[in-house]
Image: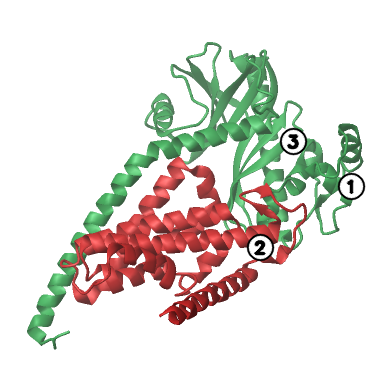
Chain colours: A green, B red
Amino acid sequence: MPETKPKSAKRDILSIVFRLTLTCLVAGLIMGTAFLLTHDAKERNEIQRNEKVMYSLLGYNEQNPAPQSMKMYPIHRYILDENQNLSVGYVIPAMDENSALLVVLDLEGNFVKQYPIAHKFGLQNNNNEDLVVQNTVGASILARFADTILVVTDNGKRTAYILDGKYPGFKTLIHIKMALNDKFDVLGFEVLEHEEDPGLGAEITQPYFKNQFNNRPAEKMKTLEVTKDPMPDDYRNALTGKGNLSNEQKGQILAQHKDDPIYALTGATISSRSVLNGNKAMVKKFVYRIEMLDKVIQSQNIQTVLKN
Amino acid sequence: MSNTLSKKELIARGILSQNPIFKLALSMCPAVGMSTTVVTGLMLGSAVFFVQVFSSLTISLIKNFIHPRIRIPTYTLVIATWVTVIDLVLAAYFPAAYAQMGIFIKLIVAFAIITMRLEMFACKESVSDSVVDGAGMGLGFLIGMVCLGFVRELIGNGTVLGYEIFSFKPFMFFILPCAGFFVVGLMMAFFNWIEARYRARMERKS
């Protein structure tokens, strides 16, 4: 490097700024192009994965596909804010396939009013649909999307619900999907995203932990606790399908342990407790909301496919 | 231009005499973290290969434009660009592989071998030589990762490419991160031993 004099140092800085800026711009352009080119494929993967998780929670897979008579309907929940007066809007499917209803309830669960919407809502909410809801309620009310419940029906009869939820884990948010049957027993849950420690909290995705929640009724979820006791071997084998158990034996063992507390993961009690508390809260809120909504649908005689 | 090696020699240098893992011992942390099986080793190795080749190409193309005082930031910027591209492509078209590699893809930005090759070679030499040199180094890393993955998967888990070779797990210990360093050390010794014997034989002949 030649010795730099004050004058050339100034020119140096200008040259550095110019070259670095240009390099950054070109780099940004390349990354942006790559993002645009791969964005669609990435989104498609996400949707496919979501679908696979949903079907597997309901007990369907490639060998045992879902029946044709099975249908899924979304219920999107919106928070409606009219000058700090909050109410809740549920977008539910109407009788005919291509339209929906926005049912507005106050915070105590009393019916306020309903709007018909001529739009077919998808299973996953998007910005476009948020706009449709906003236009329906008018400019004086602010509509904010809250969450989506999927109602699964078979031959018109409700068979299951799929919930989507995020709750804090040991480190960051844990994103899960949970399925409940029509009597609000937990069918199972699947972790979509988490950042727990590998080997410790990350074990929440393992069958021997997450399957402990299966078949727990909503009523019993309320009082479920975590225990640090070691998990009995027979229960672990039944949960993971190891140890050459026949289906009958497995059922017997699971029935024996059906009222056990949740056995915490070794070295990850906090993660275990977070998952339990998160799941508990999700089930509790869901049951409260769906019962409230059903009561209103019955009492107001709202015309929806969910009425049966 | 000071490069006197032919293209073939450049490739051979990256794989053998200056192998990033067994000779230079660079980027050991991700190498140990991702070489638990052949497949993961192959995946990280290929990602590094692409980033190395593209970064060498880019730096060689813009070598006269880079201000000498901000060489290293520019290298980092270029590497980060290509890592982001690879990251996006893998996430979009190979979601299963991407889920396994997780954070290690993003860590390629800080890989010592890549920065080292840009500083030592690509910023001085011609475009074609730089690409070949990058390919050699990338291949050296890829082959090193696959060798490590093979040994660790076979001894630690009793499988190769997921197929069962032994019905038992000879040494579970080999899957663990600390054992990765032992395997690297043992293989380093093994390669040095072969090289020493080869040299000795050549000398005897001449």
What kind of residue is marked 3? Val
Up/down of B79 relative to A67, above or below: below
Residue furthest front in the image: B205
- Residue located 76% across and 42% down the image: A211
For the question of whether residue A209 can be seen, the reply is: yes
Q: Which residue is mark 2?
A: B175
Q: Point out residue A99 in the picture as x, y percentages from the top left corner.
A: 48, 16
Image-based side of B72 in relation to A231, left or right? left
Q: Residues within 10 Å of mark 1 (few under 14, many from 20)?
A: some
Instruction: Tell me the amino acid under the disc marked 1.
Output: Asp
Q: Are marks 3 and 2 on the same chain?
A: no
- Tell me which residue sits at (20%, 64%) in the image: B126
Q: Which residue is mark 3?
A: A186
Between marks 3 and 1 in the image, the one whose residue lies nearer the viewer: 1
Numbered-mark total: 3
The relative height of residue B171 versus residue A275 in the rendered view (above or below) is below
* Residue at image coords 85%, 44%: A243
- Decide which of B73, B47 is in the foreground and name it: B47
Instruction: Give the SS element for disc 2.
Output: helix
Quadrant including the N terminus of chain A: bottom left
Element class at badge 1: helix
Q: Which mark is residue A234?
A: 1
Camera-nearest residue between A203 and A258: A203
User: Which quadrant holds the C terminus of chain A?
Assistant: top right
